[in-house]
């Protein structure tokens, strides 16, 4: 009867009436674990007679039968039955639900949930208990006509709620039951179910957020039948008490964002709706009546417990068996199952509703040999989306390439066998989604097109026809290698005397990120014992030879997309740069004296002047004199390696005279 709840107790109304109102709900602690196949109570005549007598006595003591707003006829006949075709009508205990409960779902959303629930596959499995197609008959706010009976404070007595709903469905003076209720609420019959939504400020006395999230019970309203004699109807109205089912949904305990609050309320409501439909008179419909004792009969246990005012309002109803987290005591055995989301066609509900699972006796019979089978319906199929290689989980999400295989698989609900089909589609975010493609699972796809974020959507259809809520994952397609921008070296001719500072950067843009960037100069990843990181200075005079060179950066991202950026440059000698050679080596102490440096510079100046006049032979003669002096002083006045470099630069100028 309750979900997300421990035992709820009503302590303030300590009268015999409480005992008789709740008698059929009593269930003591279990002594043993019964089998997973259950019987119902619809043929339990003794229990029906007991409840009829107790309920009749209770509403008589409470004065329901003489209250002009209620006027229930006595006695009340409580016969075991279910709601064959539930007609669900919402009642809001508020005259302006939307403005008074701004953080709750609107009345339109709750009505939409009820409409979608009634038309969905949710009740399909309940056909095994005699519950078939349902319908939503509309909704009403509280009526002024019944205001004397409605709860006046934020904590409503259980008996107040019973009196109020009885008034809403039965108030029709001057003769109760002769005309439809003046409140406008539909006349009650054997299939009627009223679902009462309490405002956010109100809960049931001794309920509270730690112990109560929903309850269902029954009442009686006046009605008339025409006398029938041997199949012939006579115009003689016979008054009788029409029993009806109702559920109470407190909303105070729902917390979180808008969707979480709505999910809490719809899960609680679906829990009470399915239990009301299968057990509308609480204990005389379908119910797990195997609790404990020598004969497992709830009737004898009920009588034994009448003196206990603190009543446990669970006795193994269909949703309690599957309540997530279980319950202390009844039901006789438990299969805790998480709430499920089922798809609906209503954007105001985000095209999904969260519902409570309930027990399927038929499926339990079919899988009686499997102790691990959980017969909690609805059995929704489940689809999964998995990514092959290469895949990279980065800060921006899951990155893939067009070579990455995406597998969409699906299993059926309950049986864990393959689902009937899986429907899927993929598209670039921001573009118009294509139609879903449907085929048996598993399915393998790849992403093609421009790089960017792609939405992969999927849902499964089970062998029982139930459909999973569509879900999606985002995959970022990245088929592009990182790009390296090289500032230095540039594709130019550098004087041999210059110092070059490497300047480059590698970026993957919006891709998966740079995994590695390997630099090389003329095919080598090091130079003169040091690396080639950006910012590294290279002394061209001493570290690189004259002529062409190649600098490359090979970038690879986290998906193994690879790209290479290369710059070719040349090292040359100019009349001015060879003079810089002399000054640099003098400053470095590789030319031992200033006199020696001046002698070398004098020859270079003469050669430069001749070269400027276009007299290459005279320039060559001066450069030859420069070379001979270095050859003579190499290893003496000039360091041998420095002499070799300057000799090579001079020979370059000789061979490259304009």
Image: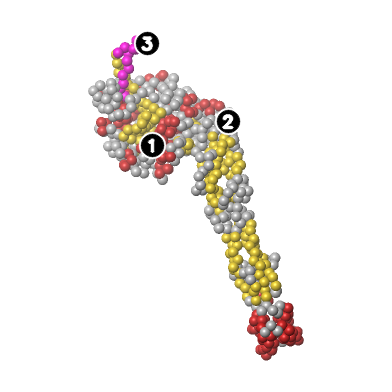
In the picture of the structure, the residue carrying the numbered disc 1 is: 110
Determine if residue 79 is in view. yes
Q: Mark 2 or mark 1, which is nearer to you?
A: 1
Q: Does residue 158 sit above or below 201 in this rendering?
A: above
Q: Mark 2 or mark 3, which is nearer to you?
A: 3
Which one is nearer the viewer's eye here, 434 or 470? 434
| Mark 2–mark 1 distance (CA, rounded to whole Å) | 38 Å
Please report the residue visible at 59 percent of the width from the left and 47 percent of the height from the top.
Answer: 448
Q: Does residue 82 sit above or below 438 in this rendering?
A: above
* Chain part drawn in magenta: 221-235
Q: Secondary structure at mark 3?
A: loop
In the picture of the structure, the residue carrying the numbered disc 3 is: 231
Residue 650 % position (x, y):
71, 81
Check whether the beta carbons of the residues at disc 2 and disc 3 lie within 8 A of each other. no
Residue 284 % position (x, y):
41, 24
Instruction: Determine if the magenta segment contains residue 233.
Output: yes
């Amino acid at each position: 009867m309750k979900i997300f709840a421990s035992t709820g107790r009503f302590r303030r109304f300590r009268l015999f009436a409480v005992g008789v109102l709740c008698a059929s709900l009593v269930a003591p602690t279990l002594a043993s674990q019964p089998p997973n196949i259950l019987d119902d109570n619809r043929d339990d005549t003794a229990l029906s007679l007991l409840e009829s007598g107790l309920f009749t006595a209770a509403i008589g003591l409470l004065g329901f039968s003489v209250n002009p707003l209620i006027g229930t006829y006595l006695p009340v006949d409580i016969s075991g039955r279910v709601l064959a075709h539930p007609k669900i009508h919402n009642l809001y205990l508020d005259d302006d639900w939307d403005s008074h409960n701004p953080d709750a779902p609107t009345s339109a959303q709750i009505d939409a949930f009820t409409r979608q629930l009634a038309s969905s596959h949710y009740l399909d499995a309940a056909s095994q208990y005699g519950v078939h197609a349902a319908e939503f008959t509309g909704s009403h706010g509280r009526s002024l006509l019944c205001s004397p009976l409605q709860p006046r404070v934020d904590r409503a007595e259980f008996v107040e709620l019973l009196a109020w709903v009885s008034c809403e469905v039965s108030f029709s003076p001057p003769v109760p039951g002769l005309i439809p209720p003046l409140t406008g609420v539909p006349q009650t019959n054997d299939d009627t179910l009223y679902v009462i939504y309490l405002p956010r400020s109100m809960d049931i006395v001794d309920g509270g957020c730690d112990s109560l999230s929903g309850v269902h019970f029954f009442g009686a309203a006046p009605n008339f039948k025409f006398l029938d004699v041997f199949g012939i109807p006579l115009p003689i109205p016979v008054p009788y008490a029409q029993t009806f089912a109702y559920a109470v949904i407190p909303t105070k305990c729902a917390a979180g964002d808008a969707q979480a609050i709505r999910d809490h309320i719809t899960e609680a409501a679906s829990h009470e709706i399915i239990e009301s439909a299968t057990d509308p008179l609480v204990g005389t419909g379908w119910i797990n009546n195997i609790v404990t004792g020598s004969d497992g009969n709830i009737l004898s246990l009920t009588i034994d417990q009448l003196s206990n005012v603190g009543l446990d309002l669970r006795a193994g109803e269909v949703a309690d068996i599957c309540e997530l987290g279980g319950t202390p005591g009844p039901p006789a055995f438990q299969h805790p199952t998480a709430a499920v989301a089922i798809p609906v066609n209503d954007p105001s509900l985000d095209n999904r509703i969260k519902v409570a699972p309930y027990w399927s006796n038929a499926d339990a019979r079919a899988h009686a040999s499997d102790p691990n089978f959980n017969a909690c319906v609805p059995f929704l199929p489940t689809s999964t989306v998995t990514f092959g290689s290469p895949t990279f989980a980065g800060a921006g999400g899951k990155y893939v390439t067009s070579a990455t295989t995406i597998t969409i698989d699906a299993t059926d609900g309950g049986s864990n066998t393959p689902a009937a089909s899986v429907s899927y589609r993929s598209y670039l975010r921001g573009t118009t989604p294509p139609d879903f493609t449907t085929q048996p699972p598993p399915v393998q796809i790849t992403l093609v097109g421009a790089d960017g974020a792609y939405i992969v959507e999927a849902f499964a259809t089970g062998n029982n026809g139930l459909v999973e809520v569509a879900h999606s994952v985002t995959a970022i397609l990245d088929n592009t290698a990182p790009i390296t921008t090289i500032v230095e070296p540039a594709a130019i001719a550098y004087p041999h005397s210059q110092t070059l500072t490497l300047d480059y950067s590698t970026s993957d843009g919006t891709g998966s990120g740079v995994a590695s960037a390997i630099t090389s100069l003329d095919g080598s990843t090091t130079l003169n014992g040091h690396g080639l990181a950006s910012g590294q200075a290279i002394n061209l005079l001493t570290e690189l030879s004259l002529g062409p060179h190649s600098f490359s950066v090979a970038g690879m991202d986290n998906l193994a997309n690879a790209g290479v950026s290369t710059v070719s440059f040349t090292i040359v000698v100019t009349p001015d740069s060879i003079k810089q050679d002399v000054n640099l080596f003098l400053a470095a102490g590789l030319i031992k004296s200033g006199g020696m440096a001046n002698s070398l510079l004098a020859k270079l100046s003469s050669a430069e002047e001749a070269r400027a006049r276009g007299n290459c032979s005279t320039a060559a003669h001066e450069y030859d004199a420069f070379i001979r002096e270095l050859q003579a002083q190499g290893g003496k006045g000039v360091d041998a390696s420095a002499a070799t470099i300057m000799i090579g630069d001079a020979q370059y100028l000789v061979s490259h005279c304009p």
